[in-house]
Image: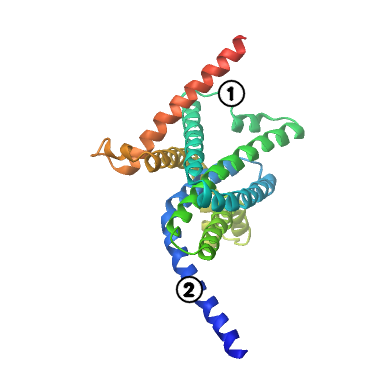
Amino acid sequence: MASGIFAILDDIAALMDDVAVMSKVAAKKTAGILGDDLAVNAEKASGFVSSREIPVLWKITKGSFINKLIILPLAFLLSAFVPVVIGIILLIGGFYLAYEGAEKIMHFLKPNKQTKKENLKQAQSEAEVLSIEKERIKSAIITDFILSVEIIIIALGTVENESISIQILVVSIIALLATVGVYGIVALIVRMDDAGFALMQNQEEESGFRYKLGELLVKSLPKVVKSLSVIGTIALLMVSGGIFTHEFHALNDFLPSIPSILKEMIYGLIAGITVFLIVQGIKTLIKKK
């Protein structure tokens, strides 16, 4: 009896060791996408009134958890029975991310008075603010879904030759990291100014270290948010381009002298502008009719 229990414990310990090793490998493989996920979602979660930042971020986080609960079992089933569908889903997601990135660039080149951030600033009533918040939360959750699909598929690919138990544990750990880690850091970023004000209030002398640090945090937040907007847009194009090069290996043979990162961004930009023009054309036709 005792020897049987110890044998089970040994098996569990061996399994945990394998899971730990494979989780490190999967984390390295998905590190770039996790970084892109952070940049994109930090940009989407910023720009709200201070009192609404955390509630909005919490809604996005809950949506992200639900995304993972939907994606994980589907990913395991599709990988086992119809793996070709995963590639199709990734491509659709790639075009959507490319479109979002191209749309941001177009709005920057040709400012639109009806952009979401400007609407948020111009909103007069609480109902208008809540309506715009709801729209941005929905957009953030959709983007999170697509990025989560790629993160989970890449993580699954690193353990495809392992047992099903290791696959489930490793991919679930990466999925949890993609939500808790990413949105935890996003929460810290959007609350930088509050932390700065708290430090400044606790230090009476303006020459003190805590006061200077607090002042730096307060002044840095607008610059961080602006830089995240740029980084987030680049990340959208790079992730989409990475999907295209992963699914169509022949794309890697084009422009051999250009670094792969820049090449992926170019592919994402081309796809994004193409989809953007198609969408605008369809909108124009609908308006004429």
Do we see residue 191 in this rendering?
Answer: no
Position of residue 204 relative to residue 92, above or below, is below
From the viewer's side, name the closer residue of 83 and 129. 83
In this rendering, which labeled residue sits more in front, label 1 or label 2? 2
Name the secondary structure under disc 1.
loop
Front-most of residues 220 and 90? 90
Q: Which residue is mark 2?
A: 17
Give the amino acid type for the residue marked by disc 1 in the picture: Lys
Rendered residue at 59%/85% (across/down):
4
- How was the colour assigned to the protein in this rendering? rainbow
Residue at the outermost front position: 81
**Residue 4 can be seen in this image:** yes
N-term-proximal mark, 1 vs 2: 2
* Residue position for label 1: 113
Q: Is residue 106 left or right of residue 5?
A: left
Number of residues whose C-alpha sits closer than 10 Å to that of mark 1, classed few (under 14), some (14–19) or many (20 or more): few
Residue at horizontal 52%, vertical 62%?
A: 164
The quadrant holding residue 198 is bottom right
Tell whether 241 sits left or right of 173: left
Q: Position of residue 92 (x, y in %)?
A: 50, 35
Across and down, in percent, residue 151 comes to 49, 50
